Image (cartoon, grey):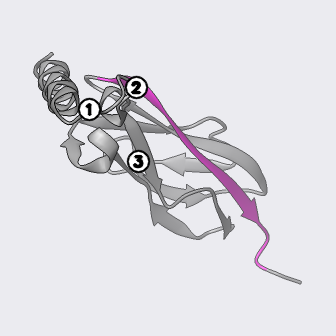
Amino acid sequence: MVARLRVLVMVLGCILQSACHGAAPSDPCTVLHVHFSPTDTTIVVGEQFRASVELATCGGSGHVTDAFTWRAADSVIASVNPVSGQVFGRSLGETRILATGREFGAVGGLRLVVQSAGP
């Protein structure tokens, strides 16, 4: 709730600032930007990486925080530590690594392809 209130205050501040500078009402401050790292990615079976997400408003100048829980859409292909976002490629295939924030709810995810190590 506090995070949503913080975003609302930031958005209102940006709108008021835009009004003073003649910006259009469709100011980017009204949009929550979500950036996953890495973006859609490919790994081989047995490899791992840490997924992360950043939230921002006001065209990226207003940063917002949340606590995320992570999961794989298909846990046969990849396993994910729900707290740290550490992803481990388990078997061949494609899945999505999804993030859900405590305050903002489901914010999306990244596409993961797990391939064989080679010939």
- Tell me which residue sits at (10%, 21%) in the image: 2
Comparing 15 with 118, the one in front is 15
Residue range corresponding to the magenta coloring: 104-117
Callout 2: helix, strand or loop? loop
Indicate the amino acid at tag 2.
Answer: Ser
Question: Which residue is pictured at 18% across the width and 20% down the height?
Answer: 8
Any mark on residue 81, and which? 3
Where residue 57 appears, as percent x and y from the top left, is 29, 38
Q: Is residue 118 above or below residue 96?
A: below
Q: Where does label 1 land, which residue?
A: 22
Cα–Cα gap, marks 1 and 2? 12 Å
Which label was assigned to residue 6?
A: none
x 61%, y 50%: residue: 78
> In the image, which is nearer the foreground, mark 3 or mark 2?
2
Residue 92 counted in the magenta span: no
- Taking depth in this image into account, of 60 and 93 the one nearest to the observer is 60
Per the model, the C-alpha gap separating discs 3 and 2 is 38 Å
**Residue 20 shown left or right of residue 51 in the figure:** left
Q: Which residue is mark 2?
A: 26
Q: Residue 102, position in %: x, y? A: 27, 25
